[in-house]
Image (cartoon, helix red, strand yellow):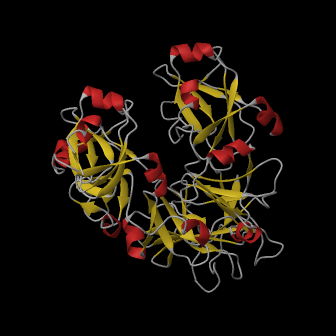
């Protein structure tokens, strides 16, 4: 419980009692959380070590006197995110949290958990109102995880571990030993994620394999790795729950190091970066998770590839990373994207993503008009609602028009293997042309995976011969060719080596048979 008090001239000279001082016994160092989502505009400093959060539409909140500030200017916070700790900066010997809500710079009556406090001038610090916070939960070491089981009114039993909830099947519940559960209201599990938070240890009881969750991905620990981490408690969990976190390089953000080294790595968007001591200090010395070296080595990319927004801690510039390329956002573009969360990072890390055209297979959405696009190897195609639904309604990344312009319009260029989502027909695309694949062609290509695309997108590439220059190989025979504008020249192994052993594109034998020899 917290006491909330004020005074007529609080803050000094304002003539208003709307600001409030929160205080309780033993509150020094208590966590202060954001009252609503928004962008941090001021992060510490000044007489009172103030944090200001801009919530949009003219609304801001202010937090004063904190001993420690846990956010950086420009970062985006969600409601309930940690932003600092209660202290007495600027009010020595009188620790408390000074809190304000303002609209267009003018103090407004405060609310507590969405209800007006009803604070009046008589509620001084000696005669405070008493509030019970729903945010003050016991601090739990993120490495120590215990399983919890809860049943909702419809009879479904959920497992809650690491801040995530999973609905168990009857078989999964039995496999876990039919643990005791607690009956809860239907909405009691709202707000829980689907992937456990970093630092969660989970065990599959059927195999006894222990997994570590880091940055929304899972890592299977061997016995030596588990021992090196101190054998922390692991929650017996349904394997399908564990698999919610993919077995892949870290996709979110994490700070990690091994048990035997002090080198700290920043992991963002599937890439890793070794921080210098100065860079780590500039980032505010964030909490570091100790992980096996194998987990760090699994992240081999140097530049982020998944969609993230990063901010240079030296210049303050904000970049959107999409398809392995970076795009500098203007303030207006950042706002149009909805003020997404921003990861503060060294400029050297951000610059590893080239400032070039977008690559890979992506689904993007224009922040200007909401138009959805499928992008295949740098070529965009505007999707109708029906085409988007036929593709399985994939998640799209919202991007500004300027970033979309880094993709070309027109026919897919390749090299690639595409499948019509309408007919199921399979094609190979190379040099702006397409070739329908037979079953024997697919077998020769070793039954590869295909990218589903709308038929109209495929039809933009004419059937015919590839344009441009390519080095190709017949996967059935191993014969190599230099292919130039629809004419092929056979290469001997020595000729291929003399060219520097360039990358070879496997081309369907049926297509190669239609390409004339030089």
At 80% from the left edge and 33% from the top edge, which residue is drawn? 224
Which quarter of the figure has residue 146? top right
Q: Is residue 444 rendered to the left or right of residue 8?
A: left
Observer-nearest of 286 and 106: 286
Q: Position of residue 211 (x, y in %)?
A: 67, 33
Asked if one can make out residue 500 in the rendered structure from this viewpoint, the answer is: no
Which quarter of the figure has residue 332? bottom left
Q: Is residue 400 rendered to the left or right of residue 325?
A: left
**How many discs mark residues in the rendered view?**
0
Q: Position of residue 157 (x, y in %)?
A: 54, 22
Which quarter of the figure has residue 206? top right
At 59% from the left edge and 24% from the top edge, which residue is drawn? 238
Q: Position of residue 112 (x, y in %)?
A: 57, 57
Position above or below: 398 against 218: below
Q: Position of residue 135 (x, y in %)?
A: 63, 50
Q: Residue farthest to the bottom? A: 13
Q: Is residue 311 rendered to the left or right of residue 278?
A: left
Observer-nearest of 418 and 305: 418
At 23% from the left edge and 30% from the top edge, which residue is drawn? 438
Observer-nearest of 415 and 194: 415
Asked if one can make out residue 190 in the rendered structure from this viewpoint, the answer is: yes
Position above or below: 390 against 306: above
Q: Is residue 14 rendered to the left or right of residue 67?
A: left
């Amino acid at each position: 419980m917290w006491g909330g008090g004020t005074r007529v001239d609080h803050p000094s000279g304002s003539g208003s009692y709307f600001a409030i001082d929160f205080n309780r016994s033993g509150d020094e160092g208590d966590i202060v959380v954001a009252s609503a989502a928004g962008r941090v505009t001021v992060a510490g400093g000044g007489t009172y070590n103030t944090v200001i959060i801009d919530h949009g539409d003219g609304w801001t909140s202010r937090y004063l006197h904190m001993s420690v500030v846990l956010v950086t200017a420009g970062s985006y916070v969600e409601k309930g995110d940690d932003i600092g700790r209660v202290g007495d900066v600027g009010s020595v010997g009188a620790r408390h949290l000074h809190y304000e809500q303002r609209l267009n710079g003018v103090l407004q009556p405060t609310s507590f958990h969405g209800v007006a406090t009803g604070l009046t001038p008589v509620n001084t610090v000696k005669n405070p109102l008493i509030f019970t916070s729903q945010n003050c939960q016991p601090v739990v070491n993120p490495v120590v995880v215990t399983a919890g089981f809860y049943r909702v009114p419809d009879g479904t039993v959920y497992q809650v571990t690491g801040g995530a909830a999973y609905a168990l099947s009857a078989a999964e519940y039995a496999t876990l030993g039919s643990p005791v559960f607690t009956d809860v209201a239907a909405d009691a599990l709202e707000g829980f994620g689907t992937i456990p938070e970093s630092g969660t240890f989970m065990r599959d009881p059927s195999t006894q394999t222990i997994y570590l969750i880091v940055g929304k991905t899972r890592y299977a620990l061997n016995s030596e790795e588990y021992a090196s981490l101190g054998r922390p408690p692991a929650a017996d969990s349904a394997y399908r729950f564990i698999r919610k976190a993919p077995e892949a390089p870290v996709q979110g953000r994490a700070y990690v190091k091994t048990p035997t080294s002090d080198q700290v790595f920043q992991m963002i968007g599937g890439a890793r970066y070794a921080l210098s001591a100065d860079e780590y200090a500039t980032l505010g010395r964030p909490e570091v998770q100790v992980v096996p070296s194998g987990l760090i080595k699994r992240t081999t990319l140097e530049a982020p590839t998944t969609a993230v927004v990063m901010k240079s801690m030296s210049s303050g510039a904000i970049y959107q990373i999409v398809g392995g390329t970076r795009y500098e956002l203007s303030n207006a573009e950042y706002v149009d994207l909805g003020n997404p969360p921003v990861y503060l990072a060294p400029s050297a890390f951000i610059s590893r993503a080239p400032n070039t055209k977008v690559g890979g297979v992506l689904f993007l959405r224009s922040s200007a008009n909401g138009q959805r696009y499928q992008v295949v190897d740098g070529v965009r195609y505007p999707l109708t609602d029906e085409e988007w639904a036929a593709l399985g309604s994939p998640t799209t990344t919202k991007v500004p028009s300027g970033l979309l312009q880094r993709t070309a319009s027109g026919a897919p260029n390749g090299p690639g293997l595409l499948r019509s989502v309408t007919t199921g027909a399979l094609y190979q695309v190379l040099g702006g042309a397409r070739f329908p694949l037979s079953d024997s062609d697919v077998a020769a290509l070793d039954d590869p995976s295909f990218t589903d695309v709308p038929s109209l997108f495929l039809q933009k590439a004419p059937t015919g011969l590839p344009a441009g220059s390519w080095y190709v190989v017949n996967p059935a025979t191993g014969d190599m060719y230099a292919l130039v504008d629809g004419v092929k020249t056979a290469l001997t192994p020595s000729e291929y080596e003399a060219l520097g052993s360039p990358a070879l594109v496997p081309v369907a034998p049926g297509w190669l048979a239609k390409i004339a020899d030089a």
